[in-house]
DNA sequence: ATATATATTTAGATGCATCTAAACGACGGT
DNA sequence: ACCGTCGTTTAGATGCATCTAAATATATAT
C-alpha cells in the first residue's frame, strides 16, 4: 500500500518530467512540493526501494514504468474529480484543483469507474489537461505555444492553463477565458501590456498571465490548402 | 488541525454514546475501531489535552461539547456522501459506507455545502440515519424497535439498518428492503426463522438480520381515533 | 477480607513524514 | 590542478499512530 504522500511524490515527478528532461533534481521536487531537500532524499530512497523510481545519487530521479503507472492513476483520479466538480457541483476552474488534490488519494476504483461513466468518459479536464484512460496509458500532451509568443493579428484558441496558479485562473475565469475560447491578439506592446479580442470584446491580460496561458492556432476554415 | 484518525475516534465515541450510557470504556472503543487498548489510551490522552473529551482513568471517556461538534460535522460529511453515492452514483446501500468513511475527512466546507444543495438538503441517509444540519446541532434519533421483538401480524415500516454490517445490508438490499419499506410479520418461529410479507411476497430473514433491523409501527390509516 | 480474574495503563519499540544542522560531493572559474 | 560555491546527502530529532509486553488498578467471587 502506498501512502498519500508517496502518491503525491510520484505524481509530481511525472508532472516535472513533462517540463524538464529527467533526471529530476532533488531541489526541483523540494520546491514543487514545498518541502526541504533532505525530505525529498529520504522519500526518494523509499520510492527507489519499492521500484517506483530510479535514482542516481547527486543527480536526481526518474519514474520507472511501475512508478509511472501509479502517477497516471492518481492523475486520472485528479482530473476526473476536477471535471466532476466543475460540471456537477458548479465549481469554477480556479476552485477545483485543491479539492481534487485532497480527494484523489481516497476514492476507490469503483468510485473512479462510476464517476467516469457519469461524466461520459471525458478526455480533458477543466484546465485543458488530458485525462488518462482507464488502461492508464500515459496520455498525449498536445503541442501548444504560450500566448505571449504571439504577435498582433494571430487568431488562437485557448488550449490549457496551469491548474496550480489559482490567481491566474481566477483572473482568466473572470475574463471569460477557458479551454476552447477563441481569441485574436490585438496589441502586444513590448513591455507588459497584452490585449486580445474575445467575441468582439477587448480583454486586457497581465504579462504574467500571457506568459503561462497555452494556446494553439485557431482551426483554419480551409483544411487542405 | 485534527487528523483523520482523531476525527474517527470522536465520531466513534459519538456513535457509541448513542448505544451505551457514557463513560465509554477503552476496550469498547478499541473493539469498535479494531485497534488495541493501549492505542486507545494514548489517543484518549491526546483528545483530552485538546479539550475534545473528558476522561476518567480506568473508567472511560465522554465527548465535550467541542468534541461533539467535531463528531457531528464528520457525521454530516459521512451521511451526505452516502446519500450522494446512492442517489447520483448508483451505489447500493451496502456499498456506500466504506467509501464515505474514506472521503469524509477530505472534503472542504465548500464541497459539503454544494453537495447538500445538490441533494436538496436531505435529512436522512440511505440507511435511515438522520443527517445533521449545517448548524451541527446533534440530530434526534427517532425511537425504533428491532424487528425481532415483533409478533406475527404486526404491520411495520423499516426505519433504519446499521450501516456497518455489509453482509446484512447486502442481504436486505437483495430482498428489496430499505428505509420506508412496509412489511407485515407473517411468522416468528421460536428459533431462527423469521418471515415477513412485503408487497404480498413472503420474504425469509435470518434471525441475525431480524435482530438488528430497526422498525417502527406502520402509520395508521386513521390518524386521530 | 482476600484472592483472582479482567481491564487499563505504562513502558518501550517501530515506521512514517518531516525538520535543522552539519558533512560532503560535483563542477565551473581561475 | 585547486578552490569555492552550491546542491545533496547524512545525522539526529520530533510528532503521529500504532504495536507488544509488563505493571497495575478495579471488580468479582469466595
Ligand atoms: Mn489539478
Ligand atoms: Mn494530493
Ligand atoms: Mn456509514
Ligand atoms: Mn473515517
Image: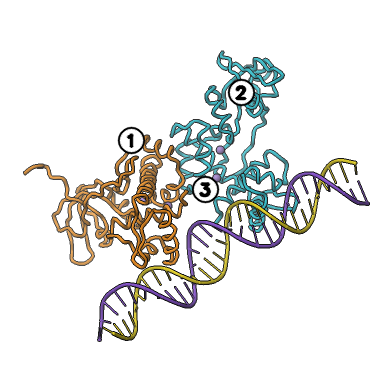
Chain colours: A orange, B cyan, C purple, D yellow
Is A9 displayed left or right of B11 in the figure? left
Furthest residue to the left? A225
Q: Where is residue B54? Give x, y as percent.
A: 70, 53
- Name the residue located 32 percent from the left edge and 52 percent from the top edge: A174
Residue located 51% across and 44% down the image: B102
Residue with the mark numbered 3:
B105
Q: Earlier in the sequence, mark 2 or mark 3?
A: 3
- Chain letter, disc 2 residue: B
**Left or right of residue A117, residue B146 in this image:** right
Q: CA distance from mark 3 to mark 1?
A: 28 Å
Callout 3 and callout 1 share a chain: no
- Whether the residue carrying mark 3 lies under 8 Å from ligand 4 is answered with yes
Give the mark toward the camera: 2 or 1. Answer: 1
Left or right: A189, with A172 as reference point: left
Q: CA distance from mark 2 to mark 3?
A: 33 Å
Q: Quadrant of the C terminus of chain B?
A: top right
Circles 3 and 1 in contact, beta carbons < 8 Å: no
Residue carrying label 2: B157
Q: Is the Cβ of the residue at disc 2 closer than 8 Å to that at disc 1?
A: no
> Which chain letter matches label 1?
A
Between residue A96 and residue A198, name the one nearer to us.
A96
Q: Are marks 2 and 1 on the same chain?
A: no
The secondary structure type at the circle numbered 2 is strand
Few, some or many C-alpha atoms within 10 Å of disc 3 (few <14, some 14-19, many ≥20)?
Answer: many
Q: What is the quadrant of residue A37 in the picture?
A: bottom left
Locate residue C22, reporting x and y percent. 48, 78
Amino acid at each position: 500500500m502506498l501512502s498519500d504522500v508517496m502518491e503525491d511524490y510520484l505524481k509530481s515527478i511525472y508532472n516535472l518530467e513533462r517540463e524538464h528532461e529527467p533526471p529530476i533534481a532533488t531541489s526541483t521536487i523540494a520546491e514543487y512540493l514545498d518541502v526541504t531537500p533532505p525530505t525529498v532524499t529520504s522519500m526518494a530512497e523509499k520510492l527507489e526501494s519499492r521500484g517506483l523510481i530510479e535514482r542516481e545519487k547527486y543527480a536526481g530521479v526518474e519514474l520507472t514504468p511501475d512508478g509511472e503507472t501509479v502517477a497516471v492513476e492518481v492523475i486520472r483520479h485528479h482530473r476526473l474529480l476536477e471535471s466532476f466538480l466543475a460540471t456537477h457541483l458548479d465549481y469554477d476552474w480556479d476552485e477545483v484543483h485543491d479539492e481534487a488534490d485532497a480527494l484523489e488519494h481516497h476514492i476507490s476504483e469503483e468510485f473512479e469507474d462510476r464517476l467516469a461513466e457519469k461524466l461520459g468518459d471525458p478526455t480533458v479536464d477543466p484546465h485543458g489537461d488530458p485525462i488518462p484512460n482507464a488502461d492508464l496509458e500515459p496520455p498525449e500532451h498536445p503541442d501548444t505555444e504560450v500566448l505571449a509568443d504571439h504577435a498582433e493579428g494571430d487568431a488562437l484558441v485557448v488550449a490549457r492553463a496551469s491548474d496550480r496558479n489559482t490567481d491566474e485562473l481566477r483572473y482568466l475565469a473572470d475574463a471569460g477565458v477557458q479551454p476552447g475560447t477563441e481569441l485574436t491578439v490585438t496589441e502586444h506592446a513590448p513591455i507588459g501590456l497584452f490585449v486580445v479580442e474575445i467575441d468582439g470584446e477587448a480583454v486586457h491580460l497581465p504579462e504574467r498571465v500571457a506568459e503561462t496561458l497555452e494556446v494553439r492556432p485557431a482551426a483554419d476554415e480551409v483544411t487542405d490548402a
